[in-house]
Amino acid sequence: MPEPGAAPGLVDVARRWAATLADTKGVSLPQEQLEQLLLDVAQDAVRTEPNHQPALLRFTKLYSASPVGIALADSDGVIVEANAALGKLLGCRPTALRGRPIADLGSSDHDVARLRSGLSQLRKLGQQTQQERLLLDHSEEGTLWVDVTLTDLPGDRPGSAYPVLMVSDANEIHLLQEQLLHQNVHDPLTGLPNATSFGNALETALAGSGREQVALVYLDVDGFKVINDGLGAGVGDQVLRGVATKLKAVFTGKHNGSVARLSGDGFAVLLRGEFTPTQVIALVEQALEELAEPIYLGGHGIGVSASAGIVVRPVTDGGPEELLRAAEIALHRAKEAGKAQWMLFDPELDARDRGRYQLGAVIAGALENGEFSLIYQPTVKLANTDQLAAVNAGLRWNHPERGELDSDEFYPLAQTTGMTIPLGRWLLAESLAATARWRRRFGEAAPDVCVRLPNRLATEPDLVLLVKEQLDRHSLPAQALRLCTDRESVLDPRGEVLDSFAVLSDLGAQLVLTISGSADLELIPQHRLPVRHVILSGAVIDALADGEDEADVRHLSQLVTRAKELKLRIGAEGVRSHEQAERLRRLGVLAARGSFVADSATGDEVDELIERHAH
């Protein structure tokens, strides 16, 4: 073909290609399809016309009418012709583009370099087509995202070629893609990076080397449900925006700090650089103070407290999963310690906790595999310590690796894993089965069985049904069962305990309350608890272990007197010696349990005690 800019013409081939382009039925052809059509026109013309002049006329006609912006350049990449579509796209006359190098259309140095690289690959490497999305300058509107295709067309002389630039508008598509990308990695409420974005940032931070430190802080708003439910979700959203703003103000700009929202009211902070745990703690304390300052919304001054878990370690010490887990554990400890405070991750505590959590995870399997057994603590009458007043039934875990585990080692874990109810159901069933066996064997000499209810079991709405099912199953009267609870369960805000105890009392079960002082004792008349027995526990009993201090004796005497006024039977737990038991007897305590009798007893040992009592 002649050099770009030569005179045009028209023959049958041009009519056929023009018809092809026009026959779009109102639908714009994709850029790639138009570009291929243009190239096919030129190649078809070269193949079918020995005389290049008609081919040039066909190509020029087509390129002039094309909706794709096109610039024809000389061998050095300088524009010699531009069609109307390119001028319209860049906000200028096509003639204004003549004489400009193609690369100079790029908006930034980066875009210019990419265009130059594309031209160079066309000339030196023989690559026929280069495609890029980049920014070009618009004469009035600044920059414009476009899809650019660089190719070349053969010249008159063998081996010669001339660059062709084809440009289509990609601005709206690119901005939409950028918006969707932003939405994918940012929280729509606060504008902070979301969990996905934060995870990527954490991996990047830990990919480095050297002596830099990385700190991860997990923050969780305490009691956010109260705000959300009490004042409405709209106010809750504004509070979360305020929390995000305050956290950014404290941490952004310090040690490459970034803040993200991970969950509903959970936030995370990532720091990297040279710092000490003390410096990180100072920032966290500042953030907690800022959050406590009220935000005024709709006439309400809303301040929030937050708990924080902090991990500080070298960037090379462990991967993202370990760092995240450590921060979660530290946050959990902060909440367990009373909330509204921070906790620094402690590897030694973590090692101990891992063992505990492993126990909690396998309780269900251990129960199914028969690893639990009953363990008893006899309660004897202080007037005659050879006589049983009752037998307290508890659980012991015969762990295949750790040996015998008492209930205080696994019940808190059962509470966390939801196994309290299954364990309580098993304890009731087995202890009532033992009671039924004792009654068949020893008759009236068989003791009552007392079961201590963990808080979760005491507040279980189906407690009455659970107890009645087991009593009926073993054909036992309700009077054979004592159910023991404490202050925490009685004061549970859900109120299930009071209702359940009223029904259980009507059935005939004996209810027992563990008390440590006058305030606990007064719960009985205050809530009209149908309690028959109280068990003195803790400091009030320990005070009489080694002697009879006047103030301690007076305190215990007052408790016993008040209990008698309420027509309650009085027992004690944690009694260590016969001397201590005798002091308690003189002060009016009727029965006791503790190491002065036996710390624990097996079923066979209880059988011996009952038999001794029976004779």
Image (cartoon, grey):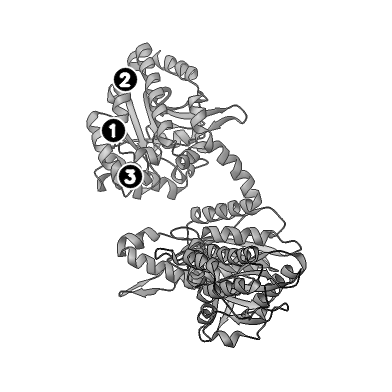
Q: Which residue is mark 3?
A: 490
Circle 3: residue type: Val
Q: Is 561 situated above or below 30?
A: above
Q: Residues within 10 Å of mark 1 (few under 14, many from 20)?
A: some
Residue 526 in percent (x, y) is at 26, 48
Q: Which residue is mark 2?
A: 473
Q: Secondary structure at mark 2?
A: helix
Q: Residues within 10 Å of mark 2 (few under 14, many from 20)?
A: few
Asked if residue 561 lies left or right of residue 321, the reply is left
Residue 298 in percent (x, y) is at 30, 74
Q: CA distance from mark 2 to mark 1?
A: 14 Å
Residue in the foreground of this view, choosing between 23 and 381: 23
Q: Secondary structure at mark 1?
A: helix
Quadrant assignment, res 585: top left
Quadrant assignment, res 345: bottom right
Quadrant assignment, res 269: bottom right
Asked if residue 96 lies left or right of residue 508, the reply is right
Q: Nearer the viewer, mark 1 or mark 3?
A: 1
- Taking the spot 60% from the left edge, 77% from the top edge, the residue there is 71
Residue in the foreground of this view, choosing between 65 and 335: 65
Q: Is 1 situated above or below 447?
A: below
Name the N-terminal-most of marks 2 and 3. 2
